[in-house]
Amino acid sequence: RQRWERLGQVLEKGLKIDASSARLKAELGRVHLVQKNYEKAAQFLEEAARHSPSDTEVLARLGDAILGSKKIEEAEAIFKRLLELDPEDAESRIQMARVFLQEGQYDRAFEELVPAIEKLLARREGERAATLLQQIVQKNPAHVPSLLKLVELYTQMQKHAAVAGAYSQ
C-alpha cells in the first residue's frame, strides 16, 4: 500500500513537470485503480484515453475503474469498444460478463464467458475458469448452463468432489 502511495506521489510530481503526459496520467490512473480509488482512477484514465483512444490497456483500466464506480452503462460501452478493437480478447469478454452479471443478465454473462473459458482452459487455467462460472452461480444458483459448464470443467480437471457439489445445486 505504501509503495503504491509513494508511486502516486512521484507520478503527481511528474505531472507538475509535464501536465500533458498521457503516459503519466495512465500510470497514475493505474495506481488509483489498484488502491480502489475508482473515481480518481477514472478521471486520469479518461484523460489518457483522450490522447490514445485505441490504447486497449488504458481502455481496459478505464472500464475497470468505471465498473468499480458502479457506472454500469458507461463500463459496458467501454468494454464493447474493446471488443470491437479485439473480438478475441478474453479479458475484455470477462469484464463484459461482469457488467452483465451486475445487471442480472446471467445468460448474457455466460455467453460472454464461454469463449474466455475456452482460452483459459487452453492455457491450463481451469481454476480461474471455474471461479468465473461460480460468480454466476452465486448470483443465480439455478443457472443451468453455468452449472453444466462447471460440471464439465470439474470433470476435465478430475475434481470429483466438485462435480458432485455442482450436481447437488
Image: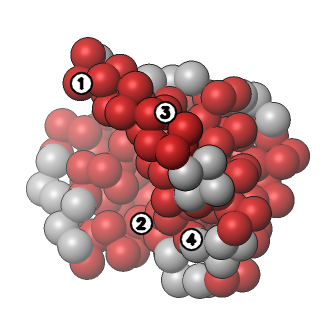
Q: Report the residue marked by disc 2.
A: 117
Label for residue 12? 3
Q: In the picture shown, does residue 118 fall above or below 46? A: below
Q: Report the residue marked by disc 1.
A: 3
- Residue 141's x, y, as percent? 58, 31
Structural distance between the alpha carbons of marks 4 and 2: 21 Å
Judged from the image, the secondary structure of the residue bearing numbered disc 4 is helix
x 71%, y 52%: residue: 47
Judged from the image, the secondary structure of the residue bearing numbered disc 2 is helix
> Closest to the observer: 99 or 5?
5
Please give left or right for residue 144 compared with residue 6 in the image: right
> Type of residue at label 4?
Thr
> Closest to the observer: 18 or 153?
18
Judged from the image, the secondary structure of the residue bearing numbered disc 1 is helix
Q: Report the residue marked by disc 4.
A: 56
- Residue 168's x, y, as percent? 41, 32
CB atoms of marks 1 and 3 within 8 Å: no
Q: Tell me which label, 3 or 2, sits earlier in the chain.
A: 3
Q: How would you rate the neighbour count of disc 2 (Cα within 10 Å): few for under 14, some for 14-19, many for 20 or more?
A: many
Q: Tell me which label, 1 or 3, sits earlier in the chain.
A: 1
Q: Tell me which label, 4 or 2, sits earlier in the chain.
A: 4
Mark 1 vs mark 2: give the one in front. Answer: 1
User: From where the camera sits, is residue 148 visible?
Assistant: no
Q: Tell me which label, 1 or 2, sits earlier in the chain.
A: 1
Mark 4 vs mark 2: give the one in front. Answer: 4
> Type of residue at label 1?
Arg
- Residue 121's x, y, as percent? 28, 70
